[in-house]
Image (tube, rainbow, N blue to C red):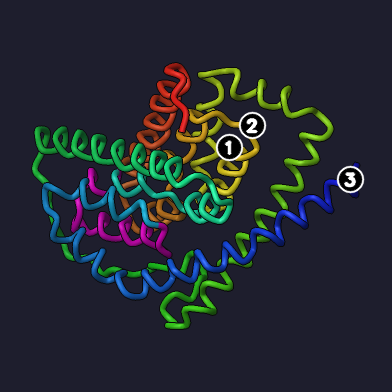
Amino acid sequence: MVADVVMDTLLDGIKLFPFLLITYLVMEYIEHKTSSKTQQIMKNAGKWGPIAGSILGVVPQCGFSAAASNLYAGRIITVGTLAAVFLSTSDEMLPILISEQVNPVTIIRILAVKVLIGMVIGFLLDLIIRRKKGTEKEEFRIEHMCDHEHCHCKEGKIFRSAFNHTLQIFIFILVISFLLNLLIGYVGEDKLAALISGKPVLGPMLSALIGLIPNCASSVVLTQLYLEGVLGAGAMIAGLLSGSGVGLLVLYRVNDDLKENLKITIMLYAVGVVFGILIEMLGIVF
């Protein structure tokens, strides 16, 4: 059985590789052309920051959530804008769904849900903060953008960046797919799915915890589990809402207020769990 799993995983991975490469080439090109513009839009958004943050955050750009953390640490953007970026950030979900040739309508629905939730939570947070105290701005030098992902985005070599990113995610997918296929083969797909998706509360709670892991592995795991039918829509959304790529990691590095960072982390987890449970209980599918 192990030999069959290895062969199936390799064949699926080989089919996926060119689609991943094309997807990342397009995204690298977009980022090289728009990265500075998107940051400027966020800076100038003011009270409409959550709208700009949630829409811009949904496009997986190298270090975009990290940039948002830096901008927030200098109070150039509000906590609501930061939350909107974190909640809408799809990290590796979008390129995987595209390369797996998932129905475009399904992809749009998933992204729309994340954008809408990001906007709503962002505005609510800003409203609460404004009622408690005014926002203060201070000088801050924006650094550390893509260094945390080692993606060489500043080198200007689009193909190299895209190929490196593709290779990293391709290896992640191969490893995760192999382990999933092995697990499904031994346990059984129905039993494994029932363990998580059969529990509308436990599933989102576990997925949201996975989402908090500050690297691309979490979004890869969650997306693959969803595509394999192991995770339900609510559990997947819970993990993808709480996940912010390396953004949360950078926030702890650049923002000196540990208590504030913990509150933002708890908020991400809570939002992911609450909306995940709602989607599971309402039986919403994408």
Give the amino acid type for the residue marked by disc 1 in the picture. Tyr
Residue 38's spot in the image, x, y percent? 26, 64
- Name the chief secondary structure element in magenta: helix
Check disc 1: other Cα within 10 Å, few if <14, some if 14-19, many if 20+: some
Q: Which residue is drawn at 45% across and 16% down?
A: 281
Q: Is mark 2 on a helix, strand or loop?
A: loop
Tell me the quadrant of the picture where the N terminus can be found.
Answer: top right
Q: Which residue is drawn at 20% across and 54% down?
A: 77
Residues rendered magenta in the picture: 60-83
Q: Residue at x 40, y 54 (%)?
A: 247
Give the amino acid type for the residue marked by disc 3 in the picture. Val
Q: Are marks 2 and 1 in contact (CB under 8 Å)?
A: yes
Going from N to C along the chain, the mark reached first, 2 or 3, is 3
- Disc 1 designates what residue? 226
Going from N to C along the chain, the mark reached first, 1 or 3, is 3
Q: Rounded to the nearest whole Å, what is the CA distance between mark 2 and mark 1? A: 6 Å
Residue 125's spot in the image, x, y percent? 21, 36
Q: Is mark 1 on a helix, strand or loop?
A: helix
- Disc 3 designates what residue? 2
Give the amino acid type for the residue marked by disc 2 in the picture. Val
Q: Rounded to the nearest whole Å, what is the CA distance between mark 1 and mark 3? A: 22 Å
- Residue 230 disc label: 2
Q: What element carries label 3?
A: helix
Q: Rounded to the nearest whole Å, what is the CA distance between mark 2 and mark 3? A: 20 Å
